[in-house]
Image (cartoon, rainbow, N blue to C red):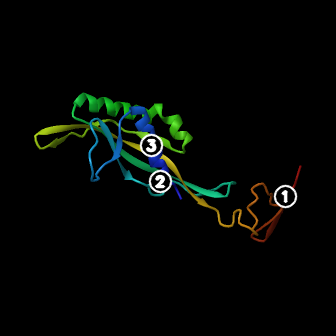
């Protein structure tokens, strides 16, 4: 099973360290941080069927999937929100790639920055945001792999004899 909490923590920690602002999940109750800050919504936690399962020699089956994030920079100053959004986008698009890859997160695409301003009673909250698509791996253990009393799959084995539709085939070594 994909560790979605680890993915979320990796992205948040990286953004906070790079931007030096707080990163919070959108649409929740509680105190709003001081401006500026970044908020995120994971709009698609796991995409539908992005490939096929593959079995690997480490006893695990893996299948790729994508996860879509909506990221918004928020401030009481237009320029500050725009600059923060640009910097966050640059981190996902280039500066943070090594850190993310080292933690099992691959950025598939980063969208353009768009205005997401919000009128709060008599004043504006300036919001600039973009979407990013992460490419991740779902992971399951292979049945019987490494369990006591069971043989693990030998991925280096060779088929010596094979019968297909009544016809026999034999491995020949030249």
Q: Where does the image place residue 130, in percent across and percent down from the top left?
A: 33, 40
Q: What separation in Å lies between label 1 and label 3 (alpha carbons)?
A: 50 Å
The answer to which of 161 and 169 lies nearer the viewer is 161
Q: Residues under labels 1 and 2: Cα distance?
A: 45 Å
Earlier-in-chain disc, 1 versus 2: 2
Q: Residues within 10 Å of mark 2 (few under 14, many from 20)?
A: some
Mark number, residue 118: none
The numbered mark, 2 or 3, whose residue comes first in the sequence reads 2
Percent position (x, y) of residue 162? 79, 65
In the picture provided, is 164 more to the left or to the right than 54? Answer: right
Which quadrant holds residue 112? top left
Q: Residues within 10 Å of mark 3 (few under 14, many from 20)?
A: some
Residue at figure coordinates x 33%, y 34% from the top left: 85
Which SS class for mark 3?
Answer: helix
**How far across and down, in percent of the image, does residue 14 sit?**
45, 38
Between 83 and 54, the one nearer to me in the picture:
83
- Of tags 1 and 2, the one toward the viewer is 2
At mark 2, the secondary structure is helix
Are circles 1 and 3 on residues that touch, CB within 8 Å?
no
Query: Dot 1 surroundings within 10 Å: few (below 14), some, or many (20 or more)?
Result: few
Quadrant assignment, res 122: top left
The residue positioned 73% from the left and 61% from the top of the image is 153
Tell me which numbered mark, 1 or 3, is placed earlier along the sequence: 3
**Viewer-closest of 140 and 23:** 23
Q: Quadrant of residue 11?
A: top left
Q: Circle 1 — which element? A: loop
Would you name the residue on which mark 1 appears? Answer: 171
Q: Give the left or right position of residue 86, taking residue 157 as reference.
A: left
User: Which numbered tag is attached to residue 11?
Assistant: 3
* Side of 19 where 119 appears, left or right: left
Q: Which residue is mark 2?
A: 4
Q: Calculate the distance from the C-alpha at mark 2 to the C-alpha at mark 3.
A: 11 Å
């Amino acid at each position: 099973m994909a560790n979605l909490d680890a993915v979320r923590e990796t992205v948040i920690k990286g953004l906070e360290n790079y931007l030096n602002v707080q990163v919070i999940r959108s649409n929740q109750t509680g105190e709003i941080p001081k401006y500026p800050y970044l908020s995120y919504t994971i709009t698609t936690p796991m995409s539908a069927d992005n490939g096929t399962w593959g079995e690997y020699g480490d006893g695990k089956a893996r299948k790729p999937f994508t996860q879509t994030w909506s990221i918004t920079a928020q401030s009481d100053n237009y320029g500050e929100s725009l600059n923060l959004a640009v910097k966050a986008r640059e981190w996902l698009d280039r500066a943070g790639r090594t850190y993310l890859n080292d933690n099992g997160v691959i950025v598939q695409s980063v969208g353009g920055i768009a205005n997401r301003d919000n009128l709060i009673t008599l004043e504006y909250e300036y919001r600039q945001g973009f979407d990013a698509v992460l490419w991740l791996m779902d992971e399951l253990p292979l049945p019987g792999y490494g369990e006591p009393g069971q043989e693990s799959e030998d991925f280096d084995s060779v088929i010596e004899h094979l019968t297909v539709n009544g016809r026999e085939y034999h491995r020949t070594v030249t």
